[in-house]
Amino acid sequence: MSGFDERQKGQEKKFELDQALEFRAGARRNKLIGLWAAGLMGLSGEAAQAYATSVAMADFEEAGDEDVLRKLRADFAAKGVTVGEQDLRTRMAALLDEARAQIRAGN
């Protein structure tokens, strides 16, 4: 095997690991935003955990974040919670960074 082939295989492996990290970070971010949203809606304990799981599951409806945002906005509206769209997007971005850091730290 040539050095080029070895480098290519190494890059492919790194890409796979990066994609796995992003998937895990996105799922963790969705749980974290779900827990945050649950708190705003007055949920705690098992109800908050169940809600966070439902937010994570909502992410499988379509690619991207729009499905999660749509769920959060609808649930907030139903509970009379006012959070702006930009605030939600900012919170999601911050929690994605936090999720990545947690995963890299092994948490």
Image (tube, rainbow, N blue to C red):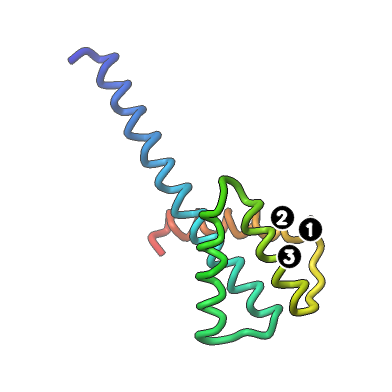
Residue 35 is left or right of residue 103, and the answer is right
Q: Secondary structure at mark 3?
A: helix
Residue at 55 percent across and 54 percent down: it is: 61
Residue 2 is left or right of residue 41, and the answer is left
Instruction: State the quadrant of the C terminus.
Output: bottom left
Where does the image place residue 25, in percent across and percent down from the top left?
Answer: 49, 54
Where does the image place residue 97, in percent across and percent down from the top left?
Answer: 58, 54
The answer to whether marks 2 and 1 mark residues whose Cβ atoms lie closer than 8 Å is yes
Q: Secondary structure at mark 2?
A: helix
Q: CA distance from mark 2 to mark 1?
A: 6 Å
The answer to whether marks 1 and 3 mark residues whose Cβ atoms lie closer than 8 Å is yes
Where does the image place residue 47, in percent across and percent down from the top left?
Answer: 55, 84
Residue type, label 2 = Arg
Tell which circle, 1 or 3, labels the residue nearer the N-terminal end.
3
Quadrant of residue 9 within the rendered picture: top left
Q: Residue furthest left?
A: 1
The vertical placement of 17 against 69, above or below, is above
Residue type, label 1 = Glu
Please tell me the numbered disc located at residue 29: none
The vertical placement of 2 against 15, above or below, is above
Residue type, label 3 = Arg
According to the picture, the residue beneath numbered tag 2 turns out to be: 89
According to the picture, the residue beneath numbered tag 1 turns out to be: 85
The answer to whether marks 2 and 3 mark residues whose Cβ atoms lie closer than 8 Å is no
Residue at 62 percent across and 51 percent down: it is: 65
